[in-house]
Image: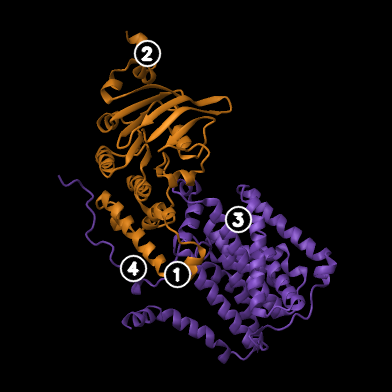
Chain colours: A orange, B purple
């Protein structure tokens, strides 16, 4: 059975159909790329999955559980986390705290246990802190030396990395990356490619929106192409590279006709 | 044993400061000064409780005096008419304020931004009007007189000095408990909501529940302050809980800075002292008050100590941060 099963999802914003009858399946352990021109509905699909913007019709099943109708925090608790296209970190919080928020839904400390501090609170904090350092160590020496720095002091690439770390720390089954290499130089981009592979090796399923074709072609097991809210193609990198619909969507039909 | 010793050593600066403040009544014999200090204490609790909402969660509440008033009236009524002993009445009035906080927060938190703010303002106005007009219960504008002195398990609080120690204890309790709330999962969730609500939600933070909890807690602390106020001044009337009072609290946060536990304390101390120091200017003294605030906004918009999360943990004794990393950065590729 597929890990994530999206069937006939439609989302319209008052007349503009951002997604139209999109169906797709994701199996556990895959790296899936979601590509398409600007405005194709890629981020909208992410928003539908995570509950930020519930779809109008259709169903999204994750491990057999219906996600449509769940609040975003409930979706996260099912084991789906995400990063954002426009970085959304907790700016005036330290790197360590940023990551720990990602892990916090697993904790049980409420107001009263915070006030009276039974021993399990300290245990929980220590565990969470260790987990945070372990995840940050995936990024080599990029983030670990900056544990006590505020997130807004980080460089652009490090902020992207911190977002990924924050999404990873709760060990989600599925992680959604929204343009993780945007604005990165080739060297940093290569680092993200290796990281995505590493994430898969750790047992997560990855779904990534990406514009850099080099990244898409090297990293993905399967590519799904959206255009104007519809799924126009799906297949391995080689199949997609040869697909005329996809080329048309990217290059535009008219230019191609002229070229011919 | 060694651990306890190290803990004492680590907190030595705090112990020194606390001891110093505790010893003030021994050196200051003028009861007027003590009274000013008591009011500073009340306002520290109020400013800190509002800080929980405005500073940590980033919800702008501008009707906080209502919860202060609920605490004061609840405490007076509980002691005078129900006959509840003072410590229980104080706790009870905090809880009653908390219940009102819940009732306000539950529906208004669906509103976003400025609408929620206006709802808190509206609540404060309604509360004031109810106090003014519900003659049979609140005695209207005449207020409630002759509120008895607090007696804690038979020990009567009578002199100013005794009142001073009571508020001192309450302030310590407030700061200590808030510090504990802020430095764990709960506090991180609140700051996360302030910094980026969407991201916090996506990370599994139940934002609505945390906001309501913060609202209830803020109302609870304000209720405690109100209870103390009622039993200290021994006379409460609606005027003490008008919107004006809410704005003084907001000014304290704006002046001292919010989002940490030190800013509101500094704000409360300075804004209570200023009108007292300039008392010789008579009615012009409020001009000083206003201009200090304006200058502050021009020079340092985030307030004296705002915009930063000062840890109450002292860095040079801290055993948690120490083991971070020392190997430095590899900025360039190594291969």
Taking the image as shown, residue B139 lies to the left or right of residue B159, namely: right
- Precedes in sequence: disc 1 or disc 2: 1
User: Are discs 3 and 4 both within one chain?
Assistant: yes
> Looking at the image, which is closer to me, B126 or A126?
A126
| Chain to which the residue tagged by mark 4 belongs | B
Q: Sort mark 2 into few (<14), some (14-19) or many (20+) by Cα contacts within 10 Å.
A: few
The quarter of the rendered structure image containing the N terminus of chain A is top left
Q: Nearer the viewer, mark 1 or mark 4?
A: 1
The residue that label 4 is drawn on is: B320
Crowd rating for badge 4 (residues with CA inside 10 Å; few <14, some 14–19, many 20+): few
Closer to viewer: mark 2 or mark 4: 4
Q: Secondary structure at mark 1?
A: loop
The residue that mark 2 highlights is A255
Q: Position of residue B301 (x, y in %)?
A: 54, 59
Q: Nearer the viewer, residue A3 or B224?
A: A3
- Vertical placement of residue A83 versus A255, above or below: below
Are both tags, 2 and 3, on one chain?
no
Same chain for the residues at labels 1 and 2, yes or no?
yes
- Residue B242 lies, in percent from the top left, at 73, 64
Q: CA distance from mark 2 to mark 4?
A: 62 Å
Which quarter of the figure is the C terminus of chain A placed in?
Answer: top left
Between the C-alphas of marks 1 and 2, the distance is 67 Å
Residue assigned mark 3? B60
Q: Chain of mark 1?
A: A
- Name the residue located 30 percent from the left edge and 28 percent from the top edge: A222
Question: Label 1: which residue?
Answer: A117
Quarter assignment of residue A186:
top left
Mark 4 lies on a secondary structure that is loop
Q: Nearer the viewer, mark 2 or mark 3?
A: 3
B52 displayed left or right of B103: left
């Amino acid at each position: 059975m597929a890990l994530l099963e999206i069937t006939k999802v439609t989302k319209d914003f008052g007349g503009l159909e951002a997604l139209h009858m999109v169906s797709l399946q994701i199996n556990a352990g895959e790296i899936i790329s979601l590509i398409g021109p600007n405005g194709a509905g890629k981020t909208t699909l992410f928003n539908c999955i995570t509950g930020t913007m519930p779809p109008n019709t259709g169903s999204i099943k994750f491990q057999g559980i219906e996600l449509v109708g769940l609040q975003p925090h409930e979706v996260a608790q099912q084991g789906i986390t995400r990063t954002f296209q426009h970085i959304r970190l907790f700016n005036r919080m330290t790197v360590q705290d940023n990551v720990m928020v990602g892990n916090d839904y697993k904790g049980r400390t409420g107001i009263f246990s915070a006030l009276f501090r039974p021993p399990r609170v300290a245990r929980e904090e220590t565990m969470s802190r260790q987990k945070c350092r372990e995840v940050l160590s995936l990024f080599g020496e990029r983030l670990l030396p900056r544990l006590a720095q505020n997130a807004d002091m980080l460089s652009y690439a490090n902020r992207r990395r911190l977002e990924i770390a924050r999404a990873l720390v709760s060990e989600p089954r599925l992680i959604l990356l929204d343009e993780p290499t945007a604005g990165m130089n080739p060297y940093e981009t290569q680092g993200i490619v290796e990281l995505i592979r590493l994430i898969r090796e750790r047992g997560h399923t990855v779904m990534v929106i990406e514009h850099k074709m080099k990244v898409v072609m090297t990293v993905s097991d399967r590519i799904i192409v959206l255009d104007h809210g519809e799924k126009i193609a799906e297949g391995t990198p080689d199949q997609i590279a040869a697909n005329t619909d996809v080329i048309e969507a990217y290059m535009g039909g008219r230019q191609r006709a002229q070229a011919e | 044993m060694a651990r306890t010793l190290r803990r004492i050593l680590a907190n030595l600066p705090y112990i020194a400061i606390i001891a110093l403040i505790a010893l003030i009544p021994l050196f200051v014999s003028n009861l007027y000064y003590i009274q000013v200090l008591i009011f500073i204490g009340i306002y520290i609790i109020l400013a800190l409780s509002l800080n929980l909402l405005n500073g940590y969660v980033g919800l702008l509440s501008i009707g906080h005096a209502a919860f202060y008033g609920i605490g004061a009236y609840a405490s007076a009524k509980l002691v005078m008419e129900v006959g509840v002993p003072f410590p229980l009445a104080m706790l009870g009035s905090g809880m009653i304020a908390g219940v009102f906080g819940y009732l306000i927060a539950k529906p208004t938190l669906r509103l976003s931004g400025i609408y929620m703010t206006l709802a808190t303002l509206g609540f404060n106005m309604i509360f004031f009007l109810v106090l003014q007009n519900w003659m049979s219960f609140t005695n209207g504008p005449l207020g409630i007189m002759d509120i008895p002195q607090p007696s804690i398990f038979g020990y009567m609080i009578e002199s100013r000095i005794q009142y001073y120690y009571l508020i001192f204890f309450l302030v310590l309790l407030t700061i200590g408990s808030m510090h504990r709330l802020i430095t764990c999962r709960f506090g991180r969730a609140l700051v996360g909501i302030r910094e980026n609500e969407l991201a916090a939600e996506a990370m599994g933070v139940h934002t609505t529940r945390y906001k309501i909890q913060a609202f209830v807690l803020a109302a609870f602390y304000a209720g405690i302050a109100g209870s103390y106020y009622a039993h200290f001044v021994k006379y409460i009337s609606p005027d003490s809980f008008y919107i004006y009072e809410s704005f003084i609290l907001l000014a304290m946060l704006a002046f001292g800075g919010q989002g940490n536990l030190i800013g509101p304390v500094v704000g409360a101390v300075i804004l209570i002292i200023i009108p007292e120091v300039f008392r010789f200017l008579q009615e012009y003294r409020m001009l000083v008050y206003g201009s200090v605030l304006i200058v502050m906004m021009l020079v340092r918009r985030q307030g004296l100590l705002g915009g930063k999360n000062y840890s109450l943990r002292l860095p040079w004794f801290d055993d948690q941060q120490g083991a971070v990393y020392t190997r430095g950065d590899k900025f360039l590729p190594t291969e």
